[in-house]
Amino acid sequence: MAHAAPTASRRHPYRPRSATGRTARDALVRALLAGLVYGVWAAFIKRQTGPVDAGNVFYGILCGALFAAILFTLGRVGPRLQREVHAAAYGVFAGVAAGYLHSLTNESVLRATTVGLFVGIGIGIGAFYRYYTRED
């Protein structure tokens, strides 16, 4: 018996997709989830093993919302940039975010700066490699 051949893709015809195949909604969900993790992590470090109070919760929400907003904006604007600038933007963002989290632990400013610098360099190099090997 003859059967209908399966189609390669079952995309909705009115659902716009970006060049990478991801929708803006997917990018927003990823940014919000990453912001949630970052906010909880920042609030956990900020409370310093004390009781959870409204200030810690508000601080976590604020940090997570800022992180998610910057990550979403970088995800939307980044593909329009040159690959070097795009990778550097992700490296700077990751370095600042990691350095800030480390500064909440009451370590020295020099150590937080060093951690942020090395995280930023690592993420920047990894992002550059990814963009260099996958972009035209």
Image (tube, rainbow, N blue to C red):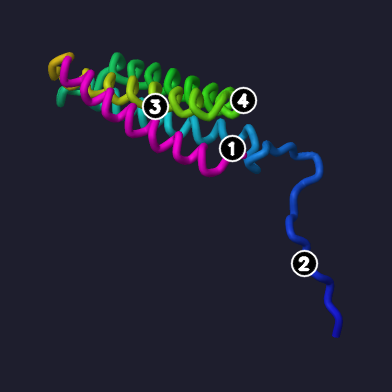
Q: Residue at x 50, y 26 (%)?
A: 86
Q: Which residue is mark 2?
A: 6
How packed is label 4: few (under 14 Cα within 10 Å), some, or many (20 or more)?
Answer: few
Q: Residue at x 59, y 29 (%)?
A: 79
Q: Which mark is residue 26?
A: 1
First in sequence, mark 4 or 2: give its number: 2
Horizontal placement of 41 versus 127: left or right? Answer: left
Horizontal placement of 24 versus 102: left or right? Answer: right
First in sequence, mark 1 or 2: give its number: 2
Residue 29 percent across, percent down from the top left: 54, 34
Disc 4 from disc 2: Cα separation: 35 Å
Q: Which residue is mark 4?
A: 80
Horizontal placement of 65 versus 98: left or right? Answer: right
Q: Residue at x 49, y 27 (%)?
A: 84
Q: Is residue 20 magenta?
A: no
Query: Which amino acid type corresponds to the residue marked 2 in the rendered image?
Result: Pro
Q: Is residue 115 magenta?
A: yes
For numbered disc 2, what is the local secondary structure?
loop
Which label sits in the foreground, 4 or 2? 4
For numbered disc 1, what is the local secondary structure?
helix
Which label sits in the foreground, 3 or 2? 3
Q: Which residue is mark 3?
A: 91
